[in-house]
Image: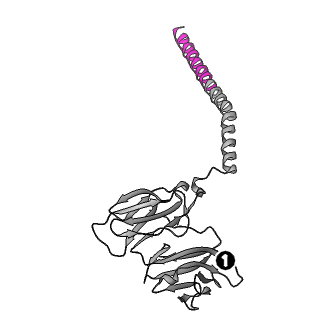
């Protein structure tokens, strides 16, 4: 299962589809998310031409106050995008590229958590059943297949790097950075101090209390055996007395 990439900041720009490379005429949705309140946040961008502009000010259309849609993308839409509040706070930034190349690499825009499954897709503008897909990390060939997907089943911090792909006879994508967060998820973290202390106290109780418990059980068994023996002797003596009286 591929896990959803997460934001490392209180406010976050999410891109849908989740990738940084797009073909010309693709559609992109950009949304501002805030852990407390997304109201008042706007999508902004900085391009090589036009400077910094908010959504709907010459580019994109706002489907809501915090979401912007770019319907038919052009290379001129390439640039750095982020969310900004009315107070000037900024979210993470995302570098989006609209390319005229015939091949793109689909990889997560946001960092992924260590241990997650990550799928990298090499996508051609024109599909062909005879395509062979090649994958590269930091300029080194790492995989080839005919499926168009490369799966990292449990991503590690060492998997972080610049990835790109090519299609035999079909061109090559630009590079995309795969970011991996190395912190362990809560379920895999070390036991808490309170948990460790509880376990320690339980062990102490077992070690100290066990001899007393065994002694109590042993004394109880001894007392029970003595009582049973005394009763047997008493019954035997009574029986002998009755026999003697009859004989006399």
In the figure, 71 relative to 34: above or below? below
Q: Of residues 104 and 185, which is closer to you in this image?
A: 104
Residue 59 percent across, percent down from the top left: 54, 89
Q: Of residues 86 and 106, which is closer to you in this image?
A: 106
Q: How is the image coloured?
A: one colour
The quadrant in which residue 12 appears is bottom right
The quadrant in which residue 225 appears is top right
Residue 246 percent across, percent down from the top left: 52, 12
- For this view, does 119 lie left or right of residue 158? left
Q: Which residues are magenta?
A: 223-248
Q: Which residue is mark 1?
A: 90
| Residue at the image position 59 percent from the left and 84 percent from the top | 66
The single residue placed furthest to the left in the displayed view is 130
Residue 197 is inside the magenta segment: no
Q: Secondary structure at mark 1?
A: strand
The single residue placed furthest to the top in the displayed view is 248
Residue 2 appears in view: no
- For this view, does 23 lie left or right of residue 186? left
Taken as a whole, is the magenta stretch helix, strand or loop? helix
Q: Of residues 100 and 65, which is closer to you in this image?
A: 100
Residue 121 percent across, percent down from the top left: 41, 67
| Residue at the image position 55 percent from the left and 69 percent from the top | 110
Residue 226 is inside the magenta segment: yes
The single residue placed furthest to the right in the displayed view is 87
Residue 103 percent across, percent down from the top left: 40, 72
> Callout 1 environment at 10 Å: few (<14), some (14 to 19), or many (20+)?
many
- For this view, does 99 lie left or right of residue 179? left
Residue 171 appears in view: yes
In the figure, 57 relative to 101: above or below? below
The quadrant in which residue 58 appears is bottom right
């Amino acid at each position: 299962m591929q896990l959803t990439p997460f934001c490392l900041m209180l406010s976050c720009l999410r891109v849908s589809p989740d990738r940084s490379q797009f073909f010309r005429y693709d559609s992109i949705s950009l949304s501002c998310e805030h852990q407390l309140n997304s109201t008042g946040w706007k999508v902004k961008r900085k391009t090589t031409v036009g400077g910094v502009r908010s959504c709907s000010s010459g580019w994109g259309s706002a489907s809501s106050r915090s979401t912007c849609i770019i319907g038919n993308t052009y290379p001129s839409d390439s640039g750095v995008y982020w969310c900004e509040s009315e107070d000037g706070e900024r979210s993470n930034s995302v570098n989006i590229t609209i390319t005229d190349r015939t091949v793109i690499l689909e990889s997560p825009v946001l960092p992924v958590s260590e241990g997650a499954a990550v799928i990298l897709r090499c996508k051609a503008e024109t599909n062909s059943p005879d395509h062979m897909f090649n994958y590269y990390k930091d300029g080194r060939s790492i995989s080839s297949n005919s499926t168009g997907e490369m799966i990292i089943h449990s991503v590690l911090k060492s998997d972080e790097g610049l990835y790109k792909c090519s299609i035999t006879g079909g061109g090559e994508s630009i590079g995309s950075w795969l970011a991996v967060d190395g912190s362990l998820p809560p379920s895999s973290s070390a036991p808490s101090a309170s948990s460790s202390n509880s376990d320690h106290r339980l062990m102490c109780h077992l070690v100290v209390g066990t001899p007393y418990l065994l002694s109590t059980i042993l004394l109880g068994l001894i007392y029970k055996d003595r009582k049973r023996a005394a009763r047997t002797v008493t019954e035997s003596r009574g029986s002998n007395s009755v026999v003697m009286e009859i004989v006399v």
